[in-house]
Image: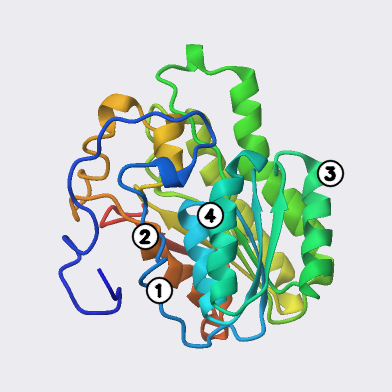
């Protein structure tokens, strides 16, 4: 596909076949997936909607975070990308795509489940970008576990630290420095509304993110800062091949949706851009679903 804006059948616009069973150790390398997720590398066209903006994107090496980072750069923003050190290969690819768009790329490896790193992440992003006015918080941990008896305290804690605590640490550090007009975008999930039995810890964090977003939005509205969330459905990312889905479910991943396929990260880029841009100036405390037809209810 050469242009995601050309009118076409959404059922067949992106990959809609079966996926092969494949397993990678977490956090995974997107470049080694089959098929490789489409993050808009060849298709996203910018139109200056974020000219001069300065964005920090977590989980930006792959998947949804990667799609957002690419889109932000092509819309005119300089971008700091956060990722785990093991994901350096994917992160370098993103950084080059940002530079190819004529924007500044700042690489900030580290683990967002660590409070001290989150503080340093915000400080380094602000210093190297010369400010900060967009936070796109996408990084997440997802591990399928068939029974609560098999769900360890270590996994439960790590999932909350990565998905929820990092959100708190990063926004707390950033908000005092965000000017009016800034935008914070969190990443919830359809799992906040329709939790899968194998994702007890993950689904719980996504529900927490939803309410954290709404409460924070009301708290910082008087500062001129907007806070919204994106709730993806089944999206083909490295999370799925690193334990996020049981192997037996991978071949038909996403086919239960009315669209009968999994989504691609590129299909969320426009939502992250809209929520970051001034076009959404009267939108805050909202959640935007990208779910292939599954209801957020």
Give the residue at x 45% y 49%.
189
Residue 162 lies, in percent from the top left, at: 64, 40
In front: label 4 or label 1: 1
As helix, strand or loop, the secondary structure at mark 3 comes to helix
As helix, strand or loop, the secondary structure at mark 2 comes to strand
Sequence order check, earlier mark of 2 and 4: 4
Residue 113 lies, in percent from the top left, at: 70, 39
The one nearer the camera, 51 or 86, is: 86
Residue behind mark 4: 187
In front: label 4 or label 3: 3
In front: label 3 or label 1: 1
Check residue 290 in the rendering and tell me which mark sits there, or answer none. 2
Give the residue at x 54% y 36%.
27
Check residue 116 in the rendering and tell me which mark sits there, or answer none. 3
Whole-number angstrom distance, CA of label 3 to CA of label 2: 32 Å
Sequence order check, earlier mark of 3 and 2: 3
Mark 4 in CB contact with mark 1 (< 8 angstroms): no
Sequence order check, earlier mark of 1 and 2: 1
Whole-number angstrom distance, CA of label 4 to CA of label 3: 22 Å
Whole-number angstrom distance, CA of label 4 to CA of label 1: 20 Å
Residue behind mark 1: 44
């Amino acid at each position: 596909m050469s242009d995601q804006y050309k009118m076409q059948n959404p059922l067949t616009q992106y990959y809609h076949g079966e996926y092969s069973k494949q397993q990678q150790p977490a956090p995974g390398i997107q470049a080694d997936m089959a098929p490789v997720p489409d993050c808009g590398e060849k298709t996203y066209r910018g139109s200056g909607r974020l000219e001069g903006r300065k964005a920090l994107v977590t989980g930006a090496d792959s998947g949804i975070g990667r799609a957002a980072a690419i889109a932000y750069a092509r819309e005119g923003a300089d971008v700091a990308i956060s990722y785990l050190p093991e994901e350096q290969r994917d992160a370098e690819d993103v950084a080059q795509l940002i530079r190819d768009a004529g924007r500044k790329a700042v690489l900030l490896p580290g683990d967002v489940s660590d409070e001290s790193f989150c503080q340093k992440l915000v400080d380094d992003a602000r210093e190297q970008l010369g400010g900060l006015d967009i936070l796109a918080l996408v990084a997440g941990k997802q591990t399928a576990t068939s029974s609560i008896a098999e769900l360890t305290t270590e996994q439960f804690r790590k999932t909350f630290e990565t998905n929820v605590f990092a959100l708190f640490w990063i926004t707390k550090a950033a908000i005092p420095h965000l000017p009016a007009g800034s935008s914070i975008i969190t990443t919830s999930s359809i799992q906040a509304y329709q939790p899968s039995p194998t994702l007890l810890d993950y689904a719980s964090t996504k529900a927490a993110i939803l309410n954290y977003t709404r409460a924070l939005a009301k708290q910082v509205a008087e500062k001129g800062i907007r806070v919204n969330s994106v709730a993806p459905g089944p999206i083909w990312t490295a999370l799925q091949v690193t334990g996020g889905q049981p192997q037996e479910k991978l071949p038909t991943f996403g086919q239960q949706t009315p669209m009968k396929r999994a989504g691609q990260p590129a299909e969320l880029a426009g939502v992250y851009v809209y929520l970051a841009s001034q076009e959404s100036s009267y939108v805050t405390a909202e959640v935007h679903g990208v779910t292939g037809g599954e209801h957020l209810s």
